[in-house]
Each structure stands twice: as C-alpha cells, then as structure tokens.
Image (tube, helix red, strand yellow):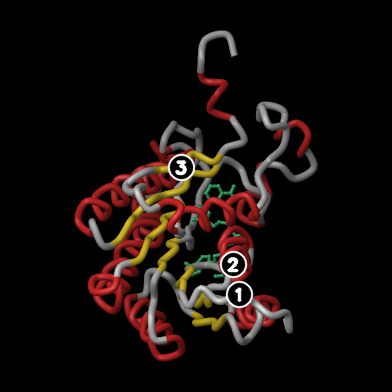
Amino acid sequence: MTAEHEDTGEVALITGASRGIGYGIAEALVARGDRVVITGRNEEALREAVERLGADRAIGVPGKAHDEAHQAHAVKRAMEAFGRVDHLVNNAGTNPVFGPLAELDLAVARKVFETNVVSALGFAQRTWAAWQKENGGTIVNIASIAGIAPSPFIGAYGVSKAAMINLTAQLAHEFAPRVRVNAIAPAVVKTRFAQALYENREAEAAAPYPLGRLGVPEDIGGAAAFLTSDAAAWLTGQTLVLDGGLFLNAGVGA
Ligand SMILES: NC(=O)c1ccc[n+]([C@@H]2O[C@H](COP(=O)([O-])OP(=O)(O)OC[C@H]3O[C@@H](n4cnc5c(N)ncnc54)[C@H](OP(=O)(O)O)[C@@H]3O)[C@@H](O)[C@H]2O)c1
C-alpha cells in the first residue's frame, strides 16, 4: 500500500487480525491514521495481512492468544516498533464445539475460557503495564450476542463471552479514569468463523434481521474506531450490541 495516511500518532494492538473482524478493525484504524500490531497463528496469513494494510503502518506478531510468552512478546514488539500501545482490541476467539452443554468435554470448556477470556485479561494486564497505566488509552473486547442471550449448541462459547462482558465492566472500573474499556457484541458477521451459520442460505439467515442483512467486518471496524476515539470519551464499561436490529425481535408480537 503506498497511499499517504493522516497520522493520529496512536498505536493499536489487535489480536486475531489476519482476517475477518480483526482485520476489519485493523483496516478501520489504519484508515484513520493509527499504526497497528496484529496477531494470529498462521504466519503466512499474517504476513499477507500486513502487506495489505501497508508495511509502514502494520507489523505482525505470530502466536496463540492464550500463550503468555506470546502476549508479552506482542506488547514488547509494539513498544519496540512504535514506542507506545494506546489501544488494545481483544478479538481472537474460538468456538471449537457445537453441541449440548450436558455432553461437553470439560477440557474443551477450559480451552474456550483460556482463549476467549483469560487471554483477553493477559493482554490487558500487559498493555496496561507497558503503556496505558501511565499514558491512558482504550481497550475493546469483542464479545458476542451469545454472551447476552442463550444460543443453543454454542453454550460454552456463550458463557465465555458473558464472562468477557463482565471482564469489560471490571476492567473499566479498575482502569478508570485513564483507560476506557468497552465491548462489542456482534450478531452473525460474515467471516470464516461464522460461515456454517449462513453458507448456502444467506437470505434465510438474514431474514430475521430488521436491517435486512448479516454483518460484515467493516461494521465492526466502524464501531471499534468509534470506541477507541475521543468521540467516545465519556463511555466506559459498556457493551455495544451490534446486531442489525436482531434483538428488536425479542418483544411480544415481533
Ligand atoms: N463472525 C461472527 O459472526 C462473530 C459474531 C460475534 C463475535 N465474533 C467474535 O469475533 C472474533 C473474531 O471472529 P471472526 O469471525 O473474525 O473469525 P475468523 O474470520 O475466523 O478470524 C479469526 C482471526 O483470529 C485468528 N485467530 C484464531 N484463533 C486464534 C488464537 N487462538 N490466537 C491468535 N489468533 C487467533 C485467526 O488467524 P489464525 O487462524 O491464523 O490464528 C484470524 O486472523 C472472535 O472472538 C469471535 O468470537 C464473531
């Protein structure tokens, strides 16, 4: 990418950002003039994402979100490369199982919590210590509407996203006034992760959405850009439900 960017002088660390929602957020923040550090497990995919974002605006740090050494290394790389880490977006998440909670392997439940919740806390501890405690900033946690209302067959995922929503409120309280912490709870967004929910039946899948379509990564990018900007300067501890109006169907006679 050779286009000239405005420069905010700010830096964002976005986990799980070689594709999908994380990449959509990286694109939105680079477009407004941030520099970004993105993570993901597959090195080649990460390298390609950095190339698309612009090698002068982005660096990639490969690793697994739950690995504490990786968390420390990613924050260290952000500080070495750019000298600051204003914003943290905890986006990397997993949902390895589909089925009833009654039969869930508890080792899988622990893995879901480790990747979706404990990792987010680990990254938050590290960006707080390295930069945000002294200099301020924001944290955005990517939760899910599955963390607000029960979603059959993805129970452990939903419980982990509910924990992420509470983690958001806890950290918002603890890190105020310097750091604002908010979450985004999307409904179905068209990514590889959610593909099974809409593949070959997108019109049917989108039918309950008052806004008439499923989400796209750009929708989440726009919301993350808002939450990490001064336009949201008096907003903390909140979870923004980003669902094309899906929850409007919860009332009587919907
Ligand atoms: N799509 C939806 O409908 C939807 C709705 C609500 C919430 N969400 C949440 O949004 C987040 C992103 O999902 P997505 O739909 O964008 O998924 P996606 O398209 O599958 O992208 C996931 C990204 O995260 C990376 N990643 C996956 N597991 C990782 C791990 N353990 N450590 C580090 N990086 C990892 C992937 O790269 P590698 O595979 O190379 O690691 C990829 O860059 C998740 O937290 C998900 O729960 C998604």
Viewer-side label of 3, 2: 2
Q: Nearer the viewer, mark 1 or mark 2?
A: 1
User: Mark 1 CB in 8 Å range of ligand 1?
Assistant: no
Image quarter for residue 75?
A: bottom left
* Residue 37, position as x, y percentages in the image: 50, 77
Q: Residue furthest bottom?
A: 80
Q: Nearer the viewer, residue 6 or 220?
A: 6
Mark 1 highlights which residue? 6
Q: Which mark is residue 32?
A: 2
CA neighbours of label 1 inside 10 A, class few (<14), some (14 to 19), many (20+): few
Q: Secondary structure at mark 1?
A: loop
Across and down, in percent, residue 29 comes to: 56, 66
Q: Are marks 3 and 2 in contact (CB under 8 Å)?
A: no
> Where residue 188 sits in the image (x, y, percent)?
61, 42
Cα separation, mark 1 vs mark 2, equals 7 Å
Nearer the observer: mark 1 or 3; the answer is 1
Location of residue 122 (image quadrant)? bottom left
